[in-house]
């Protein structure tokens, strides 16, 4: 608050009158009067400054670190006005929002040496009335004359303090103190403080905006760079810095990283064309280095142009193709739908199997799941992926018995095309995650040999290409029959069997864990109720007996169909024996793959439910979506 010059003799009279008689003169400024009264109520000593709270050395160092941007700015400001401060006996304090002194400049303040002042707290309860106190409490600039100070030994100086507002709140307080030996015009004192206040506020706002933008860019799933005409990278977000590190480019204080020195094909990339003013958007780009070849989806945007319209820098946004495939894999549902806790049971053979699966899931071994049809191999594969270190990566499933040899090979390894319309295979899509090979015993020998060779080297080629592609995939395979016997007869590649059979999990059939049937049936009911937002139903005791007395040749998959039928066709909330149909799911064979009418019939039988139809036809949801598109159907109905 800008105030006119006041008579110090009168101000001294007002101060003594209040201190000695407790009488507040009507001419005392309202803010000062309020502060005097509070200082008395708080019993702040009025003779001298002593016993002020002070931060420990380490705590003060950390606090200065948090406020480094503001400290650096005021440091640089002070260097430009140092001589002015010295000539006029001025001192400057920078305080944080809790009134701790972060930095002091020029002459001693309140007779405290500059060595002792930083880290000291100068809050209203510590020093009573001061320009700092009033700026702190009212969050306005305020000029306070010496006789208005609460502490007598400070009354030989005038002071002006101003709050520094940023981010919608007070962040700092600036306090400028003038000794009385050579009075400085009050408007100059106030102007100095206000000029620094507004400059610091503008600087902090810019810093906060930059910090926010950097935080956003660092959270982005793509690398961002600003590149100068000579190939120097003058900015890279967090992912960009990581990618530069992979390229072997290390930033130094005296020299920014340079792409031209590392990329062998630099002049044939969109970056080089960007300096000719040619932008590129979402273009597949190959980056060639001495050690490795990278493939990215890259966008290049030319930036500043000089007087001759030459481009000074470009911004590059780049996403590794491997990362893009992982994002796409998750977007289309290539992730685990079940966890290990969704497999329930209490029998000894089941709990032992589940414990082994949990242990193996935490490792990197390839795994073979052995069990009868319908015993839960697919759910177990999902659960193991979810419990593994690869859970953030994709889970890709391939049903080896569904496809002819040539089609399966394309499905696994992908294919290239001179026209550029090739596509990656499941092995490539599963990079960083898990590839689940269902019915692996039906994999043709040629495909098995190629898969084994790829697993041995960690490298493969797409069909029709010669470009080597590295991959990192964990295999989980399932088999209904005796794979060892098949491999010994030459019906399956023995070398691939040996890789998978090192860690085999045998899933017990339902008839060998009959005591688990009530628990499994109740769990199925719970899942159905949650999935369809319907109330749960219970089984009558005689209905449970009916479930226990059945052999369940189709194992859990058959039990699932029976329980689903009872759940959706029982009007009451209690399932009775007559509600349970002990039948296997309709036998549609493979006719539905070629006959739309058969597919529609199966679709209607499943009530339009994708998960139920997938169980009935024993295929993945992704496969079903492909056939829905083929037959021109939608998820809402046929």
Image: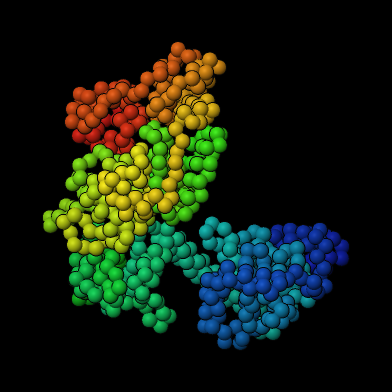
**Camera-nearest residue between 511 and 284:** 511
Does the rendering let one see residue 168? yes
Left or right of 403 in this view: 51:
right
Q: Residue at x 33, y 44 (%)?
A: 485
Res 83 quadrant in image: bottom right
Q: Name the residue furthest front.
A: 489
Image height check: is 531 above or below 265?
above
- On-image quarter of the N terminus: bottom right
Residue 556: % across, % down: 43, 30
Residue 207: % across, % down: 47, 66
Residue 451: % across, % down: 28, 53
Res 12 quadrant in image: bottom right
**Camera-nearest residue between 283 and 159:** 283
Left or right of 54 in this view: 305:
left
- On-image quarter of the C terminus: top left
Image height check: is 637 above or below 137?
above
Q: Residue at x 49, y 52 (%)?
A: 362
Left or right of 429 in this view: 13:
right
Residue 310: % across, % down: 21, 74
**Camera-nearest residue between 70 and 285:** 285
Q: Residue at x 44, y 33 (%)?
A: 509
Does the rendering let one see residue 400? no
């Amino acid at each position: 608050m800008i105030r006119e010059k006041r008579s110090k003799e009168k101000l001294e009279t007002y101060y003594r009158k209040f201190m000695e008689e407790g009488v507040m003169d009507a001419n005392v400024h309202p803010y000062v009067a309020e502060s005097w009264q509070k200082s008395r109520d708080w019993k702040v000593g009025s003779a001298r400054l002593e016993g002020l709270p002070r931060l420990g050395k380490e705590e003060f160092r950390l606090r200065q670190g948090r406020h480094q941007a503001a400290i650096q700015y005021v440091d640089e400001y002070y260097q430009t006005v140092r001589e002015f401060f010295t000539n006029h006996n001025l001192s400057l304090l920078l305080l944080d929002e809790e009134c701790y002194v972060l930095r002091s400049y020029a002459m001693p303040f309140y007779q405290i040496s500059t060595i002792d002042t930083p880290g000291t707290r100068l809050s209203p309860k510590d020093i009573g009335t001061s320009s700092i106190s009033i700026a702190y409490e009212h969050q306005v600039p305020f000029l306070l004359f010496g006789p208005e100070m609460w502490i007598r030994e400070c009354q030989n100086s005038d002071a002006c303090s101003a709050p520094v507002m940023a981010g919608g709140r007070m962040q700092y307080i600036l306090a400028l103190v003038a000794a009385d030996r050579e009075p400085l015009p009050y408007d100059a004192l106030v102007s100095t403080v206000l000029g620094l206040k507004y400059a610091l506020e503008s600087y902090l706002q810019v810093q906060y905006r930059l910090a926010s933008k950097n935080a956003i860019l660092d959270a982005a799933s793509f690398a961002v760079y600003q590149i100068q005409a000579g190939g120097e990278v003058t900015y890279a977000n967090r992912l960009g810095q990581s990618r530069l590190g992979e390229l072997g480019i290390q930033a130094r204080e005296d020299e920014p990283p340079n792409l031209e020195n590392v990329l062998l094909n630099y002049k044939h990339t969109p970056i080089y064309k960007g300096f000719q003013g040619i932008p590129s958007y979402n273009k597949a780009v190959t980056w060639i280095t001495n050690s490795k070849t990278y493939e990215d989806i890259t966008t290049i945007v030319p930036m500043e142009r000089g007087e001759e319209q030459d481009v000074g820098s470009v911004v590059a946004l780049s996403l590794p193709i491997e990362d893009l495939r992982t994002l796409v894999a998750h977007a289309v549902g290539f992730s685990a739908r079940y966890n290990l806790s969704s497999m329930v049971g209490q029998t000894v053979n089941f709990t032992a199997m589940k414990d082994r699966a949990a242990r193996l899931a935490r490792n990197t071994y390839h795994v073979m799941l052995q069990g009868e049809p319908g015993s839960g191999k697919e759910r177990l594969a999902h659960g193991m992926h979810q419990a593994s270190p690869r859970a953030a990566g994709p889970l890709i499933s391939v049903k080896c018995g569904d496809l002819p040899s040539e089609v399966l090979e394309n499905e696994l390894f992908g294919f290239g095309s001179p026209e550029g319309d090739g596509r990656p295979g499941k092995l490539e899509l599963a990079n960083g995650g898990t590839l689940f090979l269902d019915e692996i015993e039906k994999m043709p020998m040629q495909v098995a040999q190629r898969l084994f060779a790829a697993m041995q080297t960690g490298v493969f080629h797409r069909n029709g290409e010669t470009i080597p592609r590295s991959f990192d995939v964990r295999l989980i395979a399932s088999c209904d029959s005796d794979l060892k016997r098949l491999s010994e007869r030459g019906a399956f590649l023995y070398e691939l069997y040996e890789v998978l059979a090192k860690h085999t999990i045998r899933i017990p059939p339902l008839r060998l864990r009959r005591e688990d049937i009530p628990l499994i049936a109740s769990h199925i009911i719970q899942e159905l109720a949650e999935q369809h937002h319907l109330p749960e139903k219970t089984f009558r005791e005689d209905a449970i007996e009916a479930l226990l007395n059945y052999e369940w040749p189709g194992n859990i998959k058959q039990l699932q169909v029976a329980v689903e039928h009872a759940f959706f066709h029982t009007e009451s909330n209690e399932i009775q024996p007559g509600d349970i149909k002990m039948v296997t799911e309709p036998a549609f064979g493979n006719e539905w793959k070629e006959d739309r009418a058969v597919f529609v019939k199966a679709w209607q039988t499943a009530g339009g439910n994708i998960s139920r139809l997938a169980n009935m036809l024993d295929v993945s949801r992704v496969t079903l979506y492909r056939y829905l598109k083929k037959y021109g159907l939608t998820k809402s109905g046929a």
